[in-house]
């Protein structure tokens, strides 16, 4: 039986990388006494899969992982047991039971939404709802992506699903493709936006929080994004 | 949410920021205003190394059980952060509260190896504490050192207020009480240190005066005041079952060198190998009760969630209830899906059976540490491992499916000849031959793989070899070359791989190991020239060290290659570790004559440790 667990990651935990978060949860699950399933062999491993890796330095309100369990108690019991074992900065938000045919967390990811704020003194002058509209209205939105071997010009426009500024002008809301094939980093979108305005973002100017991770219950042409936990149920 | 000492900007630019944020599971948070004593406990190396150290976990747990004390952890900032902290003038902080170490009452530093000496200076310096103890005031923490290198603290004597000689469990409470009392009464720092020097196990270098002969050896070593003891007796825990041990060790976020539950089954070693310092200074052997170990194994696995557990001791095969303990662990680990990693056990039917149960034979290897190639030299070093035992063990293992063997040797041992070196190669060859004789062709999965490694022998204080000359770098490298050549000449040379250590670091380790107070200056100067992380090959600046020794007029040979006279006063002679100098000298004679001394369980050889009245010294002996 598969459980989908949603958690948040804040504060100093943002400095803990993806692999270490996995190792952290492996231990937390043991401490919490969750009846997780193990692989066989000399070094049994917990059957566990994480949705979308979160970069170091980012916070999140919408992280997901799936675990396989041997027996069921209740959503509340698992949530309480895990929250009894969390370090300061990380909280389990929901636990859902998945149907037998649900795809795994990582393969299911289609999109993610982010809120982007600016560190004090780093909010750019040009930031406005209009300039964000202009940014999105371009024919194509290109940046040069550097890899180890080459440089390639990349058009990110098809992968931006939403970009807006909230009313007080402090926070940018961004929804982008987060699938394993086309994952678009919010910092790359901001780089393009700054470049369009003849500027370069300071590495430490942005405070980025992943707000939610989505799957697509529509199709490629007419996507319908729902939080990853949508397909599960309380039990 | 705690406020971090480092800004996000800095944390994002350094490697592994998790080293500096604290907040780990089972780390202890207290309200600073609720405690009387702030204690910063430091392992002067990078976080992943320091967090792997059991001793700090024990003391951290013990001190935090005291209601009036908050013990926090400090590690060496890695070179990237070190540069940022100096550039931006950020003072060194403790992980839990993120408060500057300078404001603490104590800075405790565990000294596990000689090559960390400049890192000690780095930590004190970054904390903005004067490097020289005599320059400190009540504005600064009491800097106290401990650990194995405190058994010869002289090369770093100037930098410490106090050295704690021996095991940490016993004297911290009296020391903290004395500190509180002295602060309450408003006595001077110097007076506090004088009082501390009278506590068992405490050595306050400033209270002692050293005079030298013209040849640089020590003429006299004595307390400056009549009320300060001339000898410091090491501290030890007489009952290792009824004592402190962490039930909830701190669990790091990032992968550390020792990333598992560590169960210390006993302290000390019965074997008495003559090159081994740990085998002497931790005498007598004291076992922990097997039921206590079972209880703690369960508690620690439950409180940490670790997926692996290991045993710690100098020679686990000598633990009397090993079989019972290991079988218990196999059962609970199977149930909890936890891996067991066993330290190198003596290879016999029992250990092979256990290894077969807990690990994949294809991926594991056998380890033997003969330390010397010939039986003659093994008798000199009192290593009671014979060729017959090695070949029998290896043959048994080959039958069981193993085909990888690791062999550990030392080069440069006293009395070593070219013949002893050749026998290293011959032993490796005999093991390879045993494989081809034991395992029929059709059952072999490729060649047998034998890895022979040699390290260079460094004479250590409180060992029978403390009088021995150490080899020069050139002699070391010549010996490694001869070993390699001898291996190349073996019939099965294609099955044998040979590794050897760097010689420069061994010479440096030798200087510090038997060094005296005169070395404080070159160590300080080398640090000022940028030497830190000397234990890390890529940061070790050999040329800078040699240049510094030259500038300070330090004669390297005085510390390394010189043969000491029988009656020379050693810098560490003021310490009484239980084992007497007479016993060590007698063992030196035995070594020169190739006489073997039986282990403590077979026969008491009157080393002197019996005066502590505990452990193997008071147990009934049965032959083994």
Image (cartoon, coloured by chain):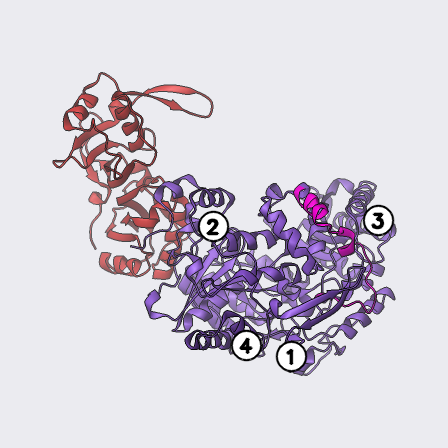
- Which color is chain B depicted in? purple
Which residue is at 11% across, 35% downward? A167
To which chain does the residue with label 4 belong? Answer: B
Q: CA distance from mark 4 to mark 1?
A: 13 Å
Q: Earlier in the sequence, mark 3 or mark 1?
A: 1
Circle 4 residue: B195
Left or right? Give the position of B31 relative to A130.
Answer: right
Report the span colored magenta: B544-571
To which chain does the residue with label 1 belong? Answer: B
Task: Assess disc 3: are there few (<14), some (14-19) or many (≥20) residues with their C-alpha within 10 Å of its C-alpha.
Answer: many
Circle 2 residue: B255
Q: Check the image and report above or below for A44 versus B205.
A: above
Task: Assess disc 2: are there few (<14), some (14-19) or many (≥20) residues with their C-alpha within 10 Å of its C-alpha.
Answer: some
Task: Assess disc 4: are there few (<14), some (14-19) or many (≥20) residues with their C-alpha within 10 Å of its C-alpha.
Answer: some
Q: Check the image and report above or below for A204 versus B513.
A: above
Note whether residue B258 is visible: no
Tag count? 4
């Amino acid at each position: 039986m598969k459980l989908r667990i949603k958690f948040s990651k804040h504060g100093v935990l943002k400095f803990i990388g993806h692999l270490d978060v996995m190792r952290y949860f492996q231990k937390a699950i043991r401490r919490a006494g969750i009846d997780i399933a193990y692989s066989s062999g000399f070094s049994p491993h917990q059957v566990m899969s994480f949705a979308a890796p979160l970069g170091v330095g980012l916070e999140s309100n919408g992280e997901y992982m799936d675990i396989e369990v041997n027996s069921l108690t209740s959503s509340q019991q698992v949530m309480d047991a895990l929250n009894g074992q969390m370090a300061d900065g990380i909280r389990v938000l929901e636990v859902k039971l998945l149907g037998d045919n649900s795809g795994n967390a990582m393969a299911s990811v289609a999109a993610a939404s982010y809120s982007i704020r600016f560190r004090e003194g780093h909010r750019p002058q040009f930031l406005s709802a209009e300039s964000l509209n202009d940014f999105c209205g371009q024919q194509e939105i290109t940046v040069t992506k550097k890899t180890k071997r080459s440089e390639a010009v990349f058009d990110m426009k098809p992968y931006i699903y939403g970009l807006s500024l909230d009313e007080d002008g402090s926070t940018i809301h961004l929804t982008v493709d987060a699938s394993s094939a086309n994952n678009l980093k919010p910092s790359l979108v901001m780089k393009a936006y700054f470049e369009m305005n003849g500027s370069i973002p300071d590495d430490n100017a942005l405070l980025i929080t992943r707000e939610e991770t989505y799957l697509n219950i529509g199709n490629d042409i007419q996507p319908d994004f729902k939080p990853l936990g949508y397909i599960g149920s309380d039990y | 949410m705690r406020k971090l000492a480092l800004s996000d900007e800095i944390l994002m630019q350094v490697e592994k920021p998790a080293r500096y944020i604290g907040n780990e599971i089972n780390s202890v948070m207290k309200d600073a205003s609720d405690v009387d004593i702030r204690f910063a406990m430091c392992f002067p190396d990078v976080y992943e190394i320091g967090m792997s150290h059991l001793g700090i976990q024990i003391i951290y747990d013990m001190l935090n059980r005291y209601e009036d004390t908050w013990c926090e952890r400090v590690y060496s900032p890695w070179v990237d952060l070190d540069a940022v902290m100096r550039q931006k003038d950020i003072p060194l902080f403790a992980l839990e509260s993120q408060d500057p170490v300078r404001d603490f009452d104590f800075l405790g530093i565990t000294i596990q190896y000689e090559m960390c000496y400049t890192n000690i200076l780095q930590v004190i310096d970054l904390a903005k504490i004067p490097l020289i103890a005599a320059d400190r005031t009540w504005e600064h923490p009491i800097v106290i050192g401990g650990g194995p290198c405190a058994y010869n603290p002289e090369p770093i004597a100037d930098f410490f207020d106090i050295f704690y000689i021996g095991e940490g469990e016993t004297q911290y409470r009296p020391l903290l009480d004395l500190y509180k009392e002295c602060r309450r009464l408003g006595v001077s720092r110097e007076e506090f240190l004088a009082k501390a020097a009278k506590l068992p196990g405490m050595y306050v270098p400033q209270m002692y005066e050293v005079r030298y002969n013209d040849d640089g050896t020590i003429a006299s070593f004595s307390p400056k005041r009549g009320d300060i003891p001339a000898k410091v007796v090491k501290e030890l825990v007489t009952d290792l079952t009824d004592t402190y041990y962490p039930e909830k060790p701190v669990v790091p976020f990032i992968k550390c060198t020792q990333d598992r539950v560590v169960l210390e089954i006993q302290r000390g070693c019965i074997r008495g190998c003559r090159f081994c310092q740990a085998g002497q200074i931790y005498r007598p052997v004291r076992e922990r009760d097997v039921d206590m170990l079972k209880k703690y194994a369960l508690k620690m696995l439950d409180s940490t969630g670790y997926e692996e557990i290991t045993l710690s001791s100098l020679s686990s095969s000598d633990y009397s209830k090993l079989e019972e303990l290991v079988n218990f662990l196999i059962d609970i680990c199977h149930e909890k899906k936890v891996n067991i990693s066993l330290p190198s056990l003596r290879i016999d039917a029992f250990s092979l059976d256990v290894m077969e149960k807990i690990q994949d034979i294809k991926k594991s290897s056998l380890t033997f540490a003969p330390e010397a190639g010939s039986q003659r030299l093994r008798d000199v070093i009192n290593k009671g491992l014979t060729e017959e035992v090695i070949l029998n063990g290896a043959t048994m293992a080959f039958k069981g499916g193993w085909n990888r063997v690791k062999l550990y040797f030392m080069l440069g041992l006293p009395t070593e000849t070219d013949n002893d070196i050749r026998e290293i190669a011959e032993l490796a060859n005999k093991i390879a031959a045993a494989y081809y004789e034991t395992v029929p062709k059709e059952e072999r999965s490729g060649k047998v793989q034998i890895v022979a490694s040699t390290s260079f022998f460094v004479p250590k204080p409180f060992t029978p070899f403390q009088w021995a000359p150490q080899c020069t770098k050139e002699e070391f490298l010549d010996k490694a070359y001869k070993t390699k050549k001898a291996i190349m000449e073996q019939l099965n040379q294609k099955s044998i791989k040979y590794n050897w250590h760097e010689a420069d670091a061994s010479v440096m380790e030798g200087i510090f190991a038997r060094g005296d107070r005169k070395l404080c200056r070159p160590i300080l100067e080398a640090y000022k020239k940028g030497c830190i992380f000397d234990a890390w090959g890529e940061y070790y600046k050999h040329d800078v060290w040699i240049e510094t020794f030259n500038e300070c007029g330090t004669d390297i040979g005085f510390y390394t290659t010189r043969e000491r006279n029988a009656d020379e006063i050693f810098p560490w002679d003021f310490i009484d570790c239980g084992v007497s100098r007479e016993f060590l000298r007698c063992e030196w004679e035995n070594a020169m004559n190739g006489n073997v001394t039986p282990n403590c369980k077979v026969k008491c050889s009157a080393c002197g440790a019996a005066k502590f009245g505990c452990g193997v010294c008071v147990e009934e002996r049965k032959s083994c």
